[in-house]
Image (tube, rainbow, N blue to C red):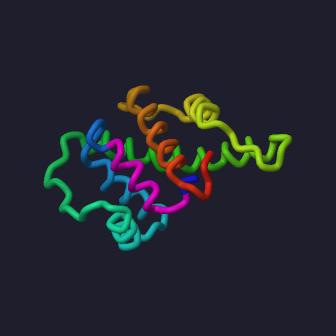
Amino acid sequence: MITTPADLARAAARCSTELNPALPAQVEARLQARGGKTARLRRDQLQAGGTETAPPSRYLEPTLAVALASLLVNIAALAWKIYEDLRSNAKAADATPAPEVLARRLRLEIELPQGVSEAQRDRLIDAVLEELQQRPDQTP
């Protein structure tokens, strides 16, 4: 599952062109507010193939970027909880929940923040699940 700041940074980068160019910076700010390490996030992001660029001097919709960033962090955290819950309830010890099951549960359980559309929420969920599938050690 998404367990590192670099995972969240990649998920934010996947959605930034479609949803808001400020999304990666806002995710970093949300992580820092939760106690994450900004320097480590930047280092991990660079190691993951990203480039270090200065953030845009002006964001078009800053409140939307904050809402999307918070939503992305919440989706990642809830995805882990749902994954663990489904896996613990499975009869087989090695059972892994299907991404479609995780996506449906996330769509049902995540509240839609004001100003965020269902399509934007769904894109963030898809980005988190895409990132999860890229992890060879913990593929859902």
Q: 137 or 10: which is nearer to us?
A: 137
Q: List x then y, in percent, for residue 80.
A: 62, 49
Q: 23 or 62: which is nearer to us?
A: 23
Q: 93 or 28: which is nearer to us?
A: 93
Name the chief secondary structure element in magenta: helix
Residue at figure coordinates x 59%, y 45% from the top left? 78
On screen, residue 121 versus residue 86, left or right, reads: left
Residue lying at the far right in this picture: please name it: 91
Residue at figure coordinates x 30%, y 56% from the top left? 25
Residue at figure coordinates x 46%, y 67% from the top left? 36
Q: List x then y, in percent, for residue 129.
A: 52, 42
On screen, residue 21 versus residue 99, left or right, reads: left
Q: Is residue 101 magenta?
A: no
Name which quarter of the figure residue 113 lies in: top left
Q: List x then y, in percent, for residue 107.
A: 55, 30
First to last magenta residue range: 3-15
Q: Is residue 102 above or below residue 34?
A: above
Q: Is residue 4 above or below residue 21?
A: below
Image quarter in which the C terminus is found: top right
Q: 90 or 75: which is nearer to us?
A: 90
Figure disc tally: 0
Q: List x then y, in percent, for residue 118.
A: 43, 26
On screen, residue 129 versus residue 89, left or right, reads: left
Residue lying at the far left in this picture: please name it: 57
